[in-house]
Image (tube, coloured by chain):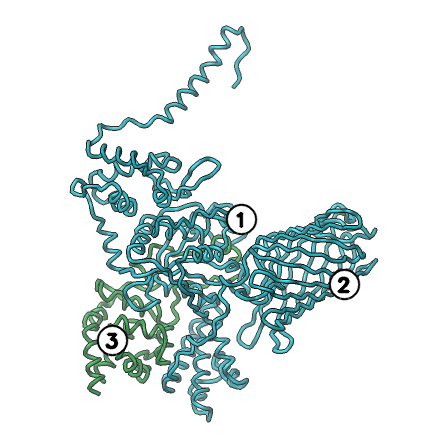
Chain colours: A green, B cyan
Amino acid sequence: MRRVAALAIAILCTFAAVGAISADQSNTGCGIGTMIFEGKDGLLSQISAATTNGTFGNQTFGITSGTVNCKKASSFVAYEKLNKFVGDNMDNLAMDMSKGSGEYLSTLAVLLDVPVEKRAQLYSVLQTNFSKIYTSESVTHIDVLNNIEAVLSAS
Amino acid sequence: MNCSRGSVRTVLPICALPLLILLLAASSAHARPIQPPEDPYVQTLLDDARRAELSEDPFWHTLLHYKGSILGLRSLVDDPKFFLVVDGKSDPEAELEATIRAFFRPVVENEEHPVCRFVARYDWLKTKLTIDESRLPLSRCRPFEELLEQIKPESVTLIFPASHMNSPASMYGHTLLTIRTVFDSDLLSYAVNYSAISDETFGPLYIVKGLLGSYKGYFSILPYYAKLQEYSDVNDRDIWEYPLDLNAEEVRRLLMHVYEMQNIYADYLFFNENCSYDLLFLLDAARPNLNLTDHCAWWVIPLDTIREVKKSGLVREAVYRPSRSTKIKHLASALTESGRRDALRIVNGTLEPEEFLKRETANEEKITVCELASEHLQYKHAKGELAKEPYVGRFMKTLNARSTLGETGDDWARQIPAPIRPDEGHHSNRVSLGFGVDDEDRTFQEIRLRPAYHTLLDNDAGYKPGSQIVFTDFVLRYYSQDGKLELEALNLIDIVSIAPRDDFFKHTSWKIRTDLYRRTMRNGEDYLVYRLNPGFGLAYENRFLGLCYAMLETELHVGGALDGNYSAGAGGSAGILKNVTDSWKIHLFAGDVYYGLGDSDILITVGLGQNLRISPDMSLSVELVGSRDDQDSGLESIIRWNAFF
């Protein structure tokens, strides 16, 4: 229990700033099932895309823009990466979290700055508390981040 | 130029006037615009540059994308914003001098200074000319430094999303680069991509315009996880990642050139100035003297650019990243029939995950069923086959169920066996030498040349089974008894996609062929006719028989030798493709076409093709084809030696 508490404290510092974001009411947040690219899969669009290897729509120099469909979080530059990552990958992250392993989950650990030796523990806690993190069908990425914080501080 | 009739003495001056005007115009076009008096320091830099012949330096040509053409040296970049001087596109020296001068321009509010705008040029010239930074109005590019700070680049990887069965858009694959950051996660890398941008909706015009270079190509940067959602997850494409051996300095140079190329366009040409070719400029900019872009070709196939990069020694290894559909197939194969059924019922909502958990099944199986169901739910939603509302509900319930089952201890996604690397399959060009006996018992020798890409009978290593992509196949035959040399066929496009259906994937197989081929007429003579032959159908994979397919087809022939100059009909074909061993493939096929319109006829074909791989770039094939039409029947047999290069 104490080890988990120590881990939780380390992560909570990260969340100090993230928590402030949820106070911003204008941020609608990204939910499950959001897609960055609407699939254009019809045969004709396939053939057309072949000649340009084109992707359609938002081809920006997207270093700062990442979450296309969702409103950007406010001005916390340092944690923008965490916010954007979770917002853009709600489904894949949820899947990995429910499995207790996977690339999206380990990326979350990297962004939370969790040392490698503590990650197995983190994944286990997150998996056990999955339904408290992804609480409903309408959960947003802001909720998910807040819930992770809550789960870790409670353990 | 029409000179009016009149006496010679009046006519000559009148005719000379337009000529004189033309000469004046021509000379003024070559004259440099009048410059203000040069700052002496700038002048010394210009003199140094001229003495060192920097405008001839290959690296200058790389940064400006200059390539030789029939019009002389020209930059492949078409955006005028890329050049500081009007004829910069064709004059490296003028562009170089304008660049040096531009560094000394005063800083203008809200305008990016040339030191920043052309950060790679500045970085190179600064060193080559040992420019005294204290003399410049601006010596550091803040936006670029911030970019470096945000990205923290560490290494570069060449990415190859392979072709996907059933998707013409992905036929030749694609290449892009990813820049790995200091964050220890591939997903957080930045993907650098070159492609054509258009606001137009898709359609036949889009295809034509793409081929003709009417679209502008741009470089773009996106987080890799966003790119993956486009390729791997949505489009069923396996991805191969080739980490490159570039050091920190080289990675920085690459990023500098990407920065210079932002929002700059070049006409996107499908055949040779495409995603893969233009990407090579970034690698050339990273390491001077790499000269990957020197390899001139009429067409550039993405896989061939990967082979070029390999040859230059930059590639260390290859990493396989399976697509979602590959993951689904893998999980499904680990389950029994009932396990697969359960997963499908969860996906289509007829089985509640909570109910499923109450069963007596082993925990391992429950885990696999839940994971398979959740992957397949995501797949269907991404493909637009499952609307958001039912998707979210079922997805969340499945994940909740999964989260109660504990961990498996191993990441199965990493354990999916990797197929043969695409760059280790046969090369793209093929030449074949054959000899045989045709259906009129005449012996012949044959030579075939096919620049691209892969046929059903070729060995599958590195390629998608059941796929065929041919862009031009030139077939010449010499009939020894008659001493006749004939064009047997000229295949223009021949694409086949045989995609097996199963419980999880309901693919449609299809084909399209257009060529000139020899058809036997009523009088027994054969003539070349133009043929257009599309088809679609179904296929299944059978453990014993192999890939079994059946298609409905239509055919249109056009040719002077035909009655009414055309012949059209419909019919079907079926076949079995089987890899007896890794090196020995068999294709058994049959077809029937009833030409009801125009020159009418019935044609039935039955054939057996066999291919034996001798080495990755050499094979032997034997084909026996029996055909029968209204008048005649015959058997053609041929043995071919195929070499790939």
Q: Residue at x 69, y 63 (%)?
A: B622
Residue that carries the numbered disc 3 in the rendered image: A115
Q: Residue at x 67, y 64 (%)?
A: B552
In the image: residue B470, left or right of residue A115: right
* Lower sequence index among marks 1 and 2: 1
In the image: residue B166, left or right of residue B306: right
Res. B508 visible in picture = no
Quarter of the image where one finds residue B68: top left
Which chain is home to disc 1? B
Residue that carries the numbered disc 2 in the rendered image: B626
Q: CA distance from mark 3 to mark 2?
A: 68 Å
Q: Nearer the viewer, mark 1 or mark 3?
A: 3
Q: Are marks 1 and 3 on the same chain?
A: no
Q: Nearer the viewer, residue B324 or B503?
A: B324
Q: CA distance from mark 1 to mark 2?
A: 38 Å
- Local packing at callout 3 (Cα closer than 10 Å; few below 14, some 14-19, many 20+) is few
**Which residue in the rendered view is the most extreme toward the left?**
B134
- Local packing at callout 1 (Cα closer than 10 Å; few below 14, some 14-19, many 20+) is few
Question: What amino acid type should be assigned to the residue bearing mark 2?
Answer: Gly
B462 in relation to B8, above or below: below
Q: Position of residue B29 (x, y in %)?
A: 38, 26
Q: Position of residue B414 (x, y in %)?
A: 41, 75
**Please, what secondary structure does the residue beneath circle 2 have?**
strand
Which chain is home to disc 3? A
